[in-house]
Image (tube, coloured by chain):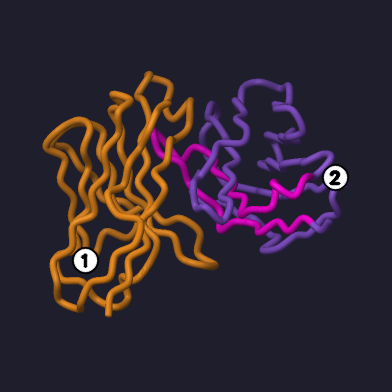
Amino acid sequence: DVKVTQSSRYLVKRTGEKVFLECVQDMDHENMFWYRQDPGLGLRLIYFSYDVKMKEKGDIPEGYSVSREKKERFSLILESASTNQTSMYLCASSMSDGQGASEGYTFGSGTRLTVV
Amino acid sequence: AQTVTQSQPEMSVQEAETVTLSCTYDTSESDYYLFWYKQPPSRQMILVIRQEAYKQQNATENRFSVNFQKAAKSFSLKISDSQLGDAAMYFCAPQGGSEKLVFGKGTKLTVNP
């Protein structure tokens, strides 16, 4: 069964801490994405990556960075966590077949981050 | 797609009845894909159905079907014979250029026994 695994289901961090959210996929997918999900706002794209060591900003990159050193792993980094980054974070991956997102995404089960 | 509108924040349906969730979007592309995802309380996003924009035939998957109107940029989801397990948030997600999907804000579906 194909899988996207997010390392933590729940996380509580203090304001100002550096936070790492990890995502690993076992499908050999080229594309990986980080979304933030908030009630009433849907899913908003933070960063995405089409290949190893490659990254592109999404719609709301401020306060975040990412790292993709290996194809299967895509990390989201909150450089200095703030309370307004309390949210659900979803990682997703997709294959690149030259037809765009033809098969859609496979999602992880999400990390609910609380910054206090 | 650049924007996606799901105009029904919440919907409810009686078990065994049919419900339709609406979605409209804006795009300048001619060939693209569209998806509906379901997110139950477990939080796992599950792909419900997929539509290719260049195909005129509406996609169906068991009790789930879409009404795709390309010219109107409308992509609604119909759930027939609703079951308690269909209760979830439903997200419409047209392709947003290249490999990206753009998600609507979601519709919360309640199924009443």
**Which residue is rendered at x = 21% and y = 66% of the image?**
A63
Relative to A44, say whether B46 is above or below: above
Residue pointed to by mark 2 = B18
User: Residue A39 at what x, y percent from top left?
Assistant: 51, 67
Chain letter for the part of the structure drawn in orange: A
Which secondary structure, mark 1? loop
B8, B71: nearer the viewer: B8
Lateral position of residue A24 relative to residue B35, left or right: left
Lateral position of residue B11 relative to residue A68, left or right: right
Residue pointed to by mark 1 = A63
For badge 2, the amino acid type reads Thr
For disc 2, the chain is B
**Which residue is rendered at x = 59% and y = 45% of the image?**
B38
**Which residue is rendered at x = 27% and y = 70% of the image?**
A12
Q: Which residues are magenta?
A: B83-111
Asked if the magenta segment contains residue A116, the reply would be no
